[in-house]
Image: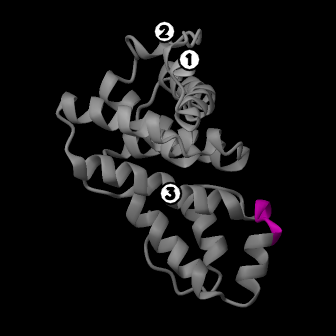
Amino acid sequence: MFGTTNSTDNAAALFNDLGIDTQLLSSNLKTLAAVDAKYLRDLKINVSNALNASTLQKKEAFLVALAVTVNEKNETLQNAFAAKATAEGATDQEIAEVIGCASLMAANNIYYRFRHFMHEEFYNNAQAGIRMSIMMNPVIGKELFELISIVVSAINGCEMCVTSHEKNLVQHGTDKQRIHDAVRLGAVLRSLAVLV
């Protein structure tokens, strides 16, 4: 997967690597491919490097990728990464939980970003009233759930959530390089989702 290619059409090569039908190439990717844009080569390398980080198992990388693409509402990439995660052993329950995690972070990131923006005691002390039982005993494990949560929170720009999840991960014993690699994967896949 993600080997070098002699093709100048890095958009099609990227889609092939992800198992996506090249007929689904977006107009943005076609525009870049038409001029053999250097950026496509960079993007292909970035995606490959991020998905193959040594701190993330394949299944974990694909589940993180799935959460990002759910958050970005990109069905083409979501289907591709769900298939990749399943091929690496992810169960239907794990896939569903990752989708649920992305949805929960969408709510939490808005709510806690609002509280952070306000810097007001009333809002800081108010009950959130958002049920989060999915976080209590996740089927993907607490550490991976937190890792996915920090990635989605970083993409959504919630400083309060990012710092909270990072603190939980470090207390759980997660290496900071693993956190870094997961957030980098999220950033790279966000850049891919913009084009797909």
Kindly indicate whether the residue at mark 3 contacts the one at mark 1 (C-beta within 8 angstroms): no
Query: Farthest bottom residue?
Result: 35
- Report the quarter where the N terminus lies: bottom left
Q: In this view, does 41 lie above or below 74?
A: below
Q: Name the residue under label 3.
A: 187
Q: Distance between the residues labelled 1 and 2?
A: 25 Å
Eye-nearest disc, 1 or 3: 1
Q: Does residue 61 belong to the magenta stretch?
A: no
Quarter of image, res 15: bottom right
Mark 2, other Cα within 10 Å: few <14 / some 14–19 / many ≥20:
few
- Report the quarter where the C terminus lies: bottom right
Kindly indicate whether the residue at mark 2 contacts the one at mark 1 (C-beta within 8 angstroms): no
Kind of element beneath mark 1: helix
Query: Farthest right residue?
Result: 27
Q: In this view, does 124 lie above or below 159?
A: above
At horizontal 69% and vertical 60% (from top left) the residue drawn is 194
Amino acid type of the residue that numbered disc 2 sits on in the rendered structure = Ser
Q: Distance between the residues labelled 1 and 3?
A: 34 Å
Q: Name the residue under label 1.
A: 122
Q: Which residues fall within the magenta stretch?
A: 23-27
At horizontal 47% and vertical 24% (from top left) the residue drawn is 94
Looking at the image, which is closer to me, 72 or 50? 72
Quarter of image, res 129: top right
Q: Mark 2 points at which residue?
A: 133
**Can you give x and y, in whole percent of width and height, for residue 49 in the image?**
38, 65
Quarter of image, res 79: top right
Q: Distance between the residues labelled 2 and 3?
A: 27 Å
**Can you give x and y, in whole percent of width and height, for residue 69 in the image?**
61, 45
Whether residue 55 is visible here, answered yes or no, is: no
